[in-house]
Image: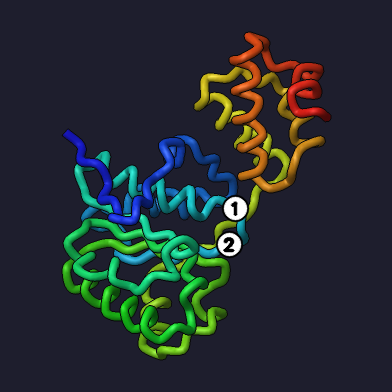
């Protein structure tokens, strides 16, 4: 039986829909493949993912934790946007886990206590043969890291730029997400949502969630007139 990913006492959990199957890779297929196979014997111990907000960094890190759980591994997701104001006590003994996913690294860069804790955690994970994936808004060498040893560690593994999707990719991602929710999203309706809706994928997916609730409540199929009515467009 698969064990659930390790959860923080602070209650930070994983979104159920943040899976690899629910992520349209577009130009990021190589990165997704590396993440999928990171826990393999020949998997890459350390992956660094950077990209603009809204490109799916958090989704991929949570998907990696879900995948580790599915393989009966123990994983921990640490979103520093939510946890960075705490002392770095959650990094203690993380080498007991199989995979650690640290999100929003830029939130703690420049803070001595956090940088030192991350440096030591990195070393312990490496020595224990465990896996680490870090996500940030900029590549390692562009982060204002104050601790030289930590700056060096951040460049040890493979670095990937998580690229945004073009319009065709955004359409495919929207329809993939709709399919995962059991929704029928015709091409013309999907194109209308893309044309009229927000540009950011996370905002588009939130729009889709709103439409899903409205469709279920009204027992209506998704059509352009219904979308206009449900969203007030």
Q: Would you name the residue on which mark 1 appears?
A: 55
Look at the numbered discs 1 and 2 and tell me whether their residues touch, using CB distance below 8 Å: yes
Which element is circle 2 on?
loop
Which label belongs to residue 51?
2
Any part of residue 227 in sight: yes
Residue drawn where x is 48% and y is 53% of the image: 58
Q: Quadrant of residue 167?
A: top right
Q: In whole angstroms, how far apart are the C-alphas of marks 1 and 2? A: 7 Å
* 52 on left or right of 87: right
Q: Quadrant of the C terminus?
A: top right
53 left or right, relative to 46: right
Image coordinates of residue 15 in percent, x first then y, are 43, 41
Residue under the image location 44 percent in, 69 percent down: 84
Q: Which disc is residue 2 wearing?
A: none
Query: Where 140 falls versus 191 (above or below)?
Result: below
**Label total for image:** 2
Query: Badge 2: how crowded within 10 Å, few (<14), some, or many (20+)?
Result: some
Q: From this view, report whether residue 110 is shown above or below residue 197.
A: below
- Is 38 situated above or below 180? below
Regarding residue 188, the answer to whether it shows in the image is no
In percent of width and height, residue 232 lies at 80, 28
Residue 211 occupies quadrant: top right
């Amino acid at each position: 039986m698969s064990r659930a990913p390790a959860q923080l006492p602070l209650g930070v959990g994983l979104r159920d829909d943040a899976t690899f199957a629910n992520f349209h890779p577009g130009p990021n297929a190589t990165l997704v493949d590396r993440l999928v196979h990171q826990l393999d014997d020949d998997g890459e111990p350390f992956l660094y993912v950077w990209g603009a907000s809204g490109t799916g960094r958090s989704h991929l890190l949570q998907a990696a934790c879900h995948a580790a759980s599915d393989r009966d591994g123990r994983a921990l997701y640490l979103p520093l946007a939510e946890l960075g104001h705490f002392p770095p006590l959650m990094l203690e003994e993380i080498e007991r886990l199989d995979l650690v996913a640290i999100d929003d690294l830029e939130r703690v860069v420049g803070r001595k206590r956090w940088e030192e804790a991350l440096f030591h955690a990195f070393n312990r994970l490496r020595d224990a043969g465990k896996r680490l994936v870090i996500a940030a808004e900029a590549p390692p060498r562009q982060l204002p890291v104050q601790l030289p040893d930590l700056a060096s560690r951040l460049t040890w593994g493979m670095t990937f730029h998580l690229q945004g999707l073009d319009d065709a990719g955004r359409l495919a991602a929207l329809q993939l997400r709709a399919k995962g929710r059991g929704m029928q999203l015709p091409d013309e309706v999907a194109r209308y949502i893309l044309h009229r809706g927000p540009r950011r994928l996370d905002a588009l997916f939130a729009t889709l969630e709103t439409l899903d609730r409205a469709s279920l409540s009204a027992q209506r199929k998704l059509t352009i007139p219904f979308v206009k009515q449900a969203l007030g467009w």
